[in-house]
Every structure is written in structure tokens, then in C-alpha cells.
């Protein structure tokens, strides 16, 4: 049975999603040395970005964070704080056809990454959860809705419009950012379990034209 919609009241009654691990913030040369790059190359990665809120019509801010999550670890990268070497590795992951990345509404995220950091970015092996569930008549395809319908948890959005560019991020901000990437992996796993052929005969990872 695939749930196609859920009222706001029902979502509010669900238990709040909590990370089962402490996310790793990467914002310095010393942090970069502790990243488990081999772990990020194994399995499927949850993918998300956060940008500084913009309240001016037509305004734009480059991404502040890039989040990647495996089934065991969650990393939050502060893009403007990273070395050229680490930025190159991250771009290689985004462009690698061998590493599957899963997110929600990813094309806009990738466009922002390209505009802010890598103008000739060529993303490969991405799965957009919104495209996965739409053929089944799912009406609400935002990540918070998918988390509620597929996982039975309420995904907090309390930190969404906070200052992602401030010098020191709060723990709540770091956990919020990591949660979005982690939930993407979990929802994808449920899709593969519940939707016949998902990830094999259809909804397969593909390149994204920007």
C-alpha cells in the first residue's frame, strides 16, 4: 500500500525524526583529514544543500553547505571554508557515475552548486525522489511529506530559514542539515522495497542536464 497524501494534522501527530548518529561538520583543513572518503564511495549517498535565505525578489546566494549521508555516517561540508583539494573531491563525487546520489528536488540544488562553484558541472548517477513517487499519484512530494508517508516520522523544518553563513553553526543547524540527507537515503530504501522495479528497471540513477 502506497500512501498518496497525509494531512498536516496527521503529520504533526507523528514522532519527530532524530538522527541515530552525530553528524560530522567539515569546515577546516583539520576536519577534512578526518573524512571517511572510502565510506562515501560505498553504497548510496543522500544529497542536499543549504543556502543562505534570501528575502529579496530575484536575489540569490551561493550554497553554504553540501550534505552527504550514508546509512552509517552524515557529513556537513561548509563549502566556502574548504580547500581546493576537498572541493575537487566533492565535485568528483557529484560527477561520478559509480556513486549513486539521492535527493529531493535535486536539479535546483545542482544548478546552485554549478552557479556558485563549478560552472561546467556535469552531475551523474542522481535519483530525484519526487520523480520516483509521482507516477504513483503521491500528491505531496516534498521531503518532509515523503518522510511522513514512507517512514512515519515528522521531519523538523525549524532551522530552514536560519543563517547558514554565520561564523559558527549551532548544533541544531548541523543536525537539521544532516537529517535531510539521511532521510533521503531512508526514503529511497523504502521506495526500493515498496515499489516494484524501483532502482532497477525504472527510477534508475541518471545524469542531470543543468
Image (tube, helix red, strand yellow):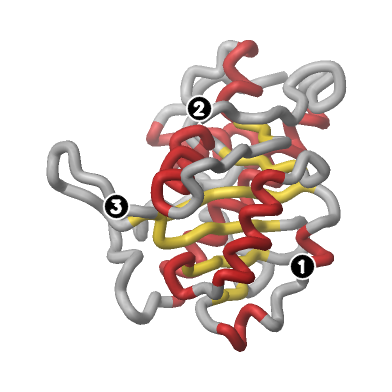
Q: Earlier in the sequence, mark 3 or mark 1?
A: 1
- Residue 163: image x %, image y %? 28, 65
Q: Which residue is mark 1?
A: 37
Q: CA distance from mark 3 to mark 2?
A: 25 Å
Residue at left offset 16%, top offset 48%: 55
Looking at marks 1 and 2 on the same chain, the residue that comes earlier in the sequence is marked by 1
- Residue 42 figure quarter: bottom right
| Label placed on residue 141 | 2
Q: Is residue 26 left or right of residue 53?
A: right
Point out which mark residue 61 bears: 3
Identify the element where label 1 is drawn. helix
Please determine whether, in this image, residue 6 is positioned above or below residue 188: above
Residue appearing at x 58%, y 84% in the figure: 29
**CA separation, marks 3 and 1?**
28 Å
Question: On the image, which quarter does residue 96 sit in?
Answer: top right
Q: Position of residue 24 (x, y in %)?
A: 61, 74
Residue 9 seen anywhere in this rendered image of the structure: yes
Q: Nearer the viewer, residue 127 or 175?
A: 127
- Identify which residue is drawn at 83% across, 66% down: 38
Residue 100, compared with residue 16, is above or below; it is: above
> Element at badge 3?
loop
Residue neighbourhood size for the residue with mark 1, other residues' Cα within 10 Å, grouped as few (<14), some (14–19), many (≥20): few
Q: Choose mark 3 or mark 2, whichever is in front.
A: 3
Amino acid at each position: 500500500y502506497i500512501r498518496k497524501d497525509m494531512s498536516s494534522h496527521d503529520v504533526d501527530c507523528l514522532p519527530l525524526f532524530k538522527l541515530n548518529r552525530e553528524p560530522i561538520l567539515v569546515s577546516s583543513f583539520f576536519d577534512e583529514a578526518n573524512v571517511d572518503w572510502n565510506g562515501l564511495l560505498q553504497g548510496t549517498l543522500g544529497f542536499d544543500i543549504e543556502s543562505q535565505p534570501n528575502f529579496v525578489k530575484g536575489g540569490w546566494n551561493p550554497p553554504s553547505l553540501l550534505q552527504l549521508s550514508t546509512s552509517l555516517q552524515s557529513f556537513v561540508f561548509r563549502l566556502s571554508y574548504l580547500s581546493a583539494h576537498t572541493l575537487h573531491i566533492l565535485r568528483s563525487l557529484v560527477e561520478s557515475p559509480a556513486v549513486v546520489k539521492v535527493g529531493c528536488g535535486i536539479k535546483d540544488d545542482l544548478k546552485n552548486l554549478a552557479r556558485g562553484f563549478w560552472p561546467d558541472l556535469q552531475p551523474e548517477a542522481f535519483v530525484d525522489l519526487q520523480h520516483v513517487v509521482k507516477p504513483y499519484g503521491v500528491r505531496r512530494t516534498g521531503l518532509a511529506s515523503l518522510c511522513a508517508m514512507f517512514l512515519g516520522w515528522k521531519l523538523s523544518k525549524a532551522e530552514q530559514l536560519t543563517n547558514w553563513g554565520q561564523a559558527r553553526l549551532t548544533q541544531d543547524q548541523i543536525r537539521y542539515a544532516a537529517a535531510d540527507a539521511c532521510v533521503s537515503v531512508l526514503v529511497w530504501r523504502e521506495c526500493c522495497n515498496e515499489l516494484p522495479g524501483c532502482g532497477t528497471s525504472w527510477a534508475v540513477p541518471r545524469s542531470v542536464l543543468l
